[in-house]
Amino acid sequence: MSGFDMNAVRAVQSRSLAGVICEQLEEMILAGKIQPGERINESQLSSLLGVSRAPIREACRQLERHGMVEVRVNRGTFVKEIDLQELEELYEIRSALDALAGERAAQVITDQELEELQVPLEVMEAATRSEDHKLYYQGNLDFHMCIMRIAGNKNLISIYEGVCKKASLFRRTSLSLPGRLPESLRQHQTIYTAIAEHDARQAATLMRHHIVDAKIALVAACQKSEDQ
Amino acid sequence: MSGFDMNAVRAVQSRSLAGVICEQLEEMILAGKIQPGERINESQLSSLLGVSRAPIREACRQLERHGMVEVRVNRGTFVKEIDLQELEELYEIRSALDALAGERAAQVITDQELEELQVPLEVMEAATRSEDHKLYYQGNLDFHMCIMRIAGNKNLISIYEGVCKKASLFRRTSLSLPGRLPESLRQHQTIYTAIAEHDARQAATLMRHHIVDAKIALVAACQKSEDQ
DNA sequence: TCTGCCCTAATTGTCGACAGTCGTCAGACG
DNA sequence: CGTCTGACGACTGTCGACAATTAGGGCAGA
């Protein structure tokens, strides 16, 4: 049971070809290898990967399910373009979902889960000290996903992931971070405290405001960068 | 330009075959023609409809996008089974989404939209007087969708539709209605008032409690029917 | 009798080919 | 010169066939 490539196994198990291609495409899109608005050419991609068009098509449909692409009939599948307004709308949805997750998590969290939740918080603390935006971003992501997991609502997690992925198609998300690390960290800490104290109402409120603040900061940063 | 069946044109334009089949399947599932847990046999369905398996497969993937079926690799696509716990979780999500929609709608609603929103309210009033559960159900649906539309958040609408469709897979949703019509109507009226007065905070709160109440009533009704 | 393996039938996953559709562009026409 | 028409090329939608996988049942061995 040693030298076993579990990744390869899982890749084949989870979805042979179509699933693998889906993950590949998702990675490429999130990395910006395929630009928003760009069309995904099925035949070109199929000959590039050496597979038939069928799994490619299926992968595209799965991506559409995640909201990352848009399929126009007889035209093809296009990588979703997110404008600032839609990003704001996504953040509003996130604020509602995060608030719900925070509320539930505060009600049901165990001591062990509380410790798990502390890990990403400490990551963010370290990232704030060293002003490591990338690390902070990751810790932030983990923190929120952790709360979602603790809340234990499968559908909520799935919807939340979709919203986050879609939002991350917006190429300038990181604009809002510089200078906001300390404030953002402080908010995460108060959220952690509220959850630790099982104060559901407070956790929900803090969560909601936390996301709304992030939205406001992002919008402001975008407008500022446009003014220049 | 007169006797032109734009519906037929749009039907062909919007989704050739796969889309049509998707709608057909969705209808069949919601009508209970295909039971939850049942497998959708691709070859059987393809020979039944006289088309190839490709559009069938695609339709199934679209249904998976809507959360109505579950695709297990190398096993097939199965109509989603909803248990009471998952239904509760879906209602919790709904409460968050509806609250957000109510909040936004209260902020941006116009006089004309207010009149449009009054239509389903009047339907529910009439349904309550005549104790027409089916009609009330429809009015209820329209009322909430109308608020969603007014809120104007496209992604929110899409997510909301998915949650509602999934919830409606639970076969005993209507159990909670008998005896609750007057109370439910009253809640809708207060929501309408809050939105009309542009009281966003109040609209959000009322919405949230409205859905939570519906959830509680449904759970109670289910447990009651199980006890018997 | 029970357990485990293998075989088979049914069904999904993948393939290559063809048909249908859309955008483009050259050419005809006013 | 601008507009419309029709053919062309590229691409997606659909098809039928084949390969791979799974579930179920029969059979041999303990």
Image (cartoon, coloured by chain):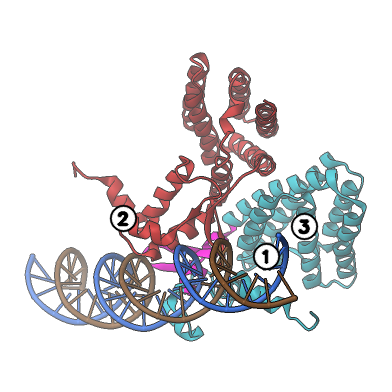
Chain colours: A red, B cyan, C brown, D blue
**Residue A211 seen in the current view:** yes
Residue designated by label 3: B144
Magenta-span inclusion, residue B24: no
**Do the residues indicated by labels 2 and 1 lie within the same chain of the protein?**
no
Task: Please state which amino acid type lies under the numbered disc 1.
Answer: Thr
The tag on residue A53 is none
What is the secondary structure assignment of the residue under circle 3? helix
What is the secondary structure assignment of the residue under circle 1? helix
Pinpoint residue A206: horizontal percent, then vertical percent.
68, 29
The relative height of residue D11 versus residue A158 in the rendered view (above or below) is: below
The answer to whether residue D5 is left or right of residue B206 is left
Circle 1/circle 3 CB separation < 8 Å: no
Q: Quadrant of the image for the N terminus of chain A?
A: top left
Distance from disc 3 to disc 2, alpha carbons, whole Å, reads 42 Å
Which residues fall within the magenta stretch?
B55-84
Of badges 1 and 3, nearer the viewer stands 3
Circle 2/circle 1 CB separation < 8 Å: no
The relative height of residue A139 versus residue A83 in the rendered view (above or below) is: above
Distance from disc 1 to disc 3, alpha carbons, whole Å, reads 16 Å
Residue designated by label 2: A12
**Residue B67 seen in the current view:** no
Pinpoint residue B134: horizontal percent, then vertical percent.
77, 72
Front-most of residues B157 and B124: B157
Residue at left offset 33%, top offset 51%: A11
Residue designated by label 1: B173
Residue at left offset 60%, top offset 72%: B23
Q: Earlier in the sequence, mark 1 or mark 3?
A: 3
Chain letter of mark 3 equals B
